[in-house]
Amino acid sequence: MIEDNYDDIINLPHPEPKNHRRMSMMARAAQFAPFAALTGHDDAIAETARLTDQQIELDGALNDELNEAFAQLQQCVSDHPVVEVTHFVPDARKQGGSYMTVTGAVKRLALDTQHLILAAGTSIAIPAIISLKIK
């Protein structure tokens, strides 16, 4: 017959610590929570991988086309024509940016501040514009 070595202690109550309280179940569970050693590393990698465009410089023909469109716009700006504007928007977090196309009615052409202001409140810097079409 095999002798069981734990017969003398198997039915004794679990010992309680005398110097400190038992750890709560929540505190014990927190020990096994996931740990991210490099906090923010995934965000930094995603930001680096995000692509931006460089602002293009207009050549002579495109620049002449744009100047002609602005001359037409100056003549009819009081009629608040609808325009389609493609312009460069600099990225707030890294070098470069992106091109956006906006369509809307012109509120005014502020040549003193070099901005085209649309009726919706959008203000577009004239030097950032690469295409302007009057609809």
Image: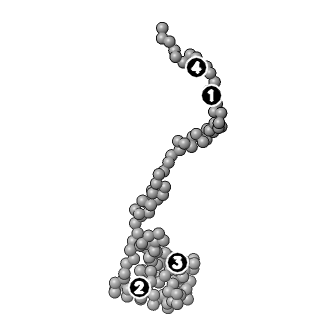
Q: Amino acid at mark 2?
A: Leu
Judge left or right: residue 113 versus residue 65: right
Cα separation between marks 1 and 4:
12 Å
Q: Viewer-proximal residue, 44 or 130?
A: 44
Label 4 environment density (alpha carbons within 10 Å; few <14, some 14–19, many ≥20): few
Q: Which residue is mark 3?
A: 104
Q: Amino acid at mark 1?
A: Pro
The local secondary structure at tag 3 comes to: strand
Q: Amino acid at mark 4?
A: Ile
**How many marks overall?**
4
| In this view, the mark in front (4 or 3) | 4
Q: Are marks 2 and 4 in contact (CB under 8 Å)?
A: no
| In this view, the mark in front (1 or 4) | 1
Cα separation between marks 1 and 3:
77 Å
Q: Are marks 4 and 3 in contact (CB under 8 Å)?
A: no
Colour pattern: one colour
- x, y percent for residue 98: 43, 72
Q: Which residue is mark 4?
A: 10
The local secondary structure at tag 2 comes to: helix
Residue 76 in view of the camera: no
Specify which label sits upstream in the sequence, 1 or 2.
1
Cα separation between marks 4 and 3:
83 Å
Label placed on residue 111: none
Specify which label sits upstream in the sequence, 1 or 3.
1
Label placed on residue 66: 2
The local secondary structure at tag 1 comes to: loop
Cα separation between marks 1 and 2:
86 Å
Cα separation between marks 3 and 2:
18 Å
Q: Amino acid at mark 3?
A: Gly
Label 1 environment density (alpha carbons within 10 Å; few <14, some 14–19, many ≥20): few
Q: Which residue is mark 1?
A: 15
Cα separation between marks 2 and 4:
91 Å
